[in-house]
Image (tube, rainbow, N blue to C red):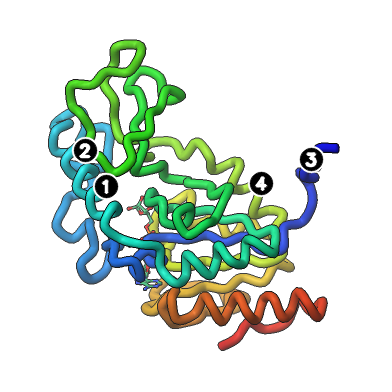
Amino acid sequence: MIDVPDPLAQIPLVILTGAGISAGSGLATFRGAGGLWNGTPVTEVASPAGWQKDPDRVRTFYDQRRCALAQVEPSVAHRALADLQRSVAVRIITQNVDDLHERAGSSDVLHLHGVLTRVRSCLDPTITQDIGYQAQDPLARCPRGARWRPDIVWFGEEVPLITVAQQVIARAQEVWIIGSSLSVYPAAGLWQDAPSSARVVYVDPHPTTRLPDRVQVVAASADQAVPGLVQEFLRRMRTGLTSGPAPC
Ligand code: APR
């Protein structure tokens, strides 16, 4: 008997991650000190116009990030979430394009903004190819003869998985937002699609985003906060206390 998950069943915990969870692995975030967008104009390397204008510059930007990704390991927080996912039906939705959740052992990760280790046909976005951590070959062509491009959702492009993500978070009993400045929509507004009864926890060492009082802010790094959050969540699951304040 194949166990078909109930599409309407509640999900004990949905986790939305951003670049901050990979900071513990040594990868740069986008904003704040040392952010990727500090030295590189977004429109030049992460937009369709930038690709049209100078595809070599765009390819180099992502080649460099793929090379950096090959040299790092999942963080303490990635691993703690993967451990949790082994015992609880946790869904992970990430804005990150790195593969560190998967390398930590997480599964069924929903990548809202694409995947760094993959390229897609410029002619047909359903035609993709995994290139791992290699530099993209500018001369390679897809089976339909078109150029490949990074399989990344660029600024100004639709977020194909946002509806799926909204359907997931609408079933959440609890939401953790880990390592995101909540600057980029529609991902930044996703947590608000959770039921009003859902507990929402926001983990960020420099919480600048204005959030409603219902959100429990944990002003700490992901590596400092996530292991404790996981232990406290498991304790509540064991005792049946799925509500109540998250740790300060
Ligand atoms: N642990 C947790 N959070 C951290 C850590 C850490 N060790 N270090 C930094 N942070 C926080 C920062 O304070 C910041 O609030 O992580 C957040 C990272 O914010 P951004 O750099 O804006 O990254 P993110 O929110 O993921 O960006 C969203 O913007 O450029 C686009 O597509 C790109 O997916 C990206 C989207």
Q: Which residue is pictured at 42% across the width and 67% down the height?
A: 179
Q: Mark 1 points at which residue?
A: 66
In the figure, 49 relative to 226: above or below? Answer: above
How far from the left and from the top, in percent, is residue 237?
Answer: 76, 74
Residue 4 numbered mark, or none:
3
For the residues labelled 3 and 4, the Cα–Cα distance comes to: 17 Å
User: Which circle's residue, 1 or 2, is located before the other in the chain?
Assistant: 1
For the residues labelled 1 and 4, the Cα–Cα distance comes to: 30 Å
Q: Which residue is pictured at 29% across the width and 16% down the height?
A: 146
Number of the front mark, 2 or 4: 2
Residue 135 numbered mark, or none:
2
For the residues labelled 2 and 4, the Cα–Cα distance comes to: 35 Å
User: Which circle's residue, 2 or 4, is located before the other in the chain?
Assistant: 2
For the residues labelled 3 and 2, the Cα–Cα distance comes to: 39 Å
Q: Please name the amino acid that badge 4 sits on.
A: Gln
Name the residue furthest top: 144
Number of numbered discs visible in the structure rendering: 4
Q: Please name the amino acid that badge 1 sits on.
A: Arg
Q: In this view, does 94 lie to the left or right of 201?
A: left
Q: Which residue is pictured at 46% across the width and 39% down the height?
A: 159
Q: Do the residues labelled 1 and 2 touch (CB within 8 Å)?
A: yes
Q: Is residue 182 left or right of residue 33?
A: right
Q: Mark 4 points at which residue?
A: 167
Rendered image quadrant of residue 151:
top left
